[in-house]
Amino acid sequence: MIANFHTHTVFCDGNNTPEEIILCAIDKGFSAIGFSGHGYTDFDLRYCMKETCGYIDEINRLKAKYKNSIQVYLGVEEDAFCLVDRSKFDYIIGSSHYFHIGSKYYPIDSNYDYFKKCLTAFNYDIERLAQTYYTAFCEYINRRKPDIIGHFDLITKFDELDSSLFLQNANYNKIAEKYITVASNSSSVFEVNTGAIARGLRTSAYPNENLLYILKKLDARLILSSDSHNIDTLDFAFSQTKAYLKDIGFSHLYTIYNGEFVKYDI
């Protein structure tokens, strides 16, 4: 089964309309497509949906229009610092895109220059940065229990650009391993997200390999997603990532079909 449930459109920071994406997904033989516009964040309007009602209406219209060709799901990517009305959506992806320090929000993944501001705010103390990020994120995850946990180790997004601050740091890895175990208590599905590969920033998906081994030991459920902002990346690196997961020891993944999480062999 092929599907993607982390998909952005022109309603937030994506490049294509929902209908263009649906037609592409049908052409690729998808069983389902899920839309996950960035939930409204009042402290940062650059990336989020500002016409959420229009988004909901449009996805529901397209659900009906294409019901005989593909399953369409209305989701949202909720930021841990700004919750949405969950009842309006088929599923939520719970992600953390910011540090909240004092009265300021520092975006984690906008670009490398913005992330350097995060590093500066922590005086390049990687362990304190990681501890702060994962503590807040896991508190949100276990309180909110999102259907899907988005790009768990997003703070490593730029780790292959310059010098590796995180993934080659043994103390960081211990912190991340501790907190992904904490997050697994939520019973949420963890996404394996190929978005940074598509952007040329990483050579493998989130979460990184050692965290995937932890998830395997925990028998956690995984869903493959591309964090797509363009129709060209709807299933980006899916084949290679499935092979990578099989090498780690996973034999199946999960998808959403007929409104439920179901597993399929890889």
Image: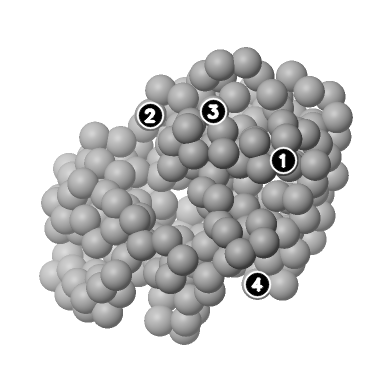
The quadrant where residue 198 appears: top left
Residue at disc 1, secondary structure = loop
Residue at disc 3, secondary structure = loop
4 or 1: mark nearer the eye: 1
Amino acid on which the number 4 mark rests in the picture: Arg
Residue furthest out toward the top: 163
Q: Mark 3 highlights which residue? A: 158
3 or 4: mark nearer the eye: 3
Q: Residues within 10 Å of mark 2 (few under 14, many from 20)?
A: many
Amino acid on which the number 2 mark rests in the picture: Ala
Disc number for residue 122: 1
Q: Are marks 3 and 4 in contact (CB under 8 Å)?
A: no
3 or 1: mark nearer the eye: 1
Amino acid on which the number 1 mark rests in the picture: Phe
Residue drawn at x 68%, y 66% is 140
Amino acid on which the number 3 mark rests in the picture: Phe
The quadrant where residue 174 appears: top right
Image position, residue 247 (x, y; %): 64, 22
Residue drawn at x 75%, y 64% is 139
Residue at disc 2, secondary structure = helix
Image position, residue 158 (x, y; %): 54, 28
> Separation of disc 4 and disc 2 at Cα?
29 Å
Q: Mark 4 highlights which residue? A: 144
First-in-chain label (4 vs 2): 4
The quadrant where residue 213 appears: top right
Image position, residue 175 (x, y; %): 83, 40
Image position, residue 120 (x, y; %): 64, 36
Q: Are marks 3 and 1 in contact (CB under 8 Å)?
A: no
Residue drawn at x 29%, y 52% is 13
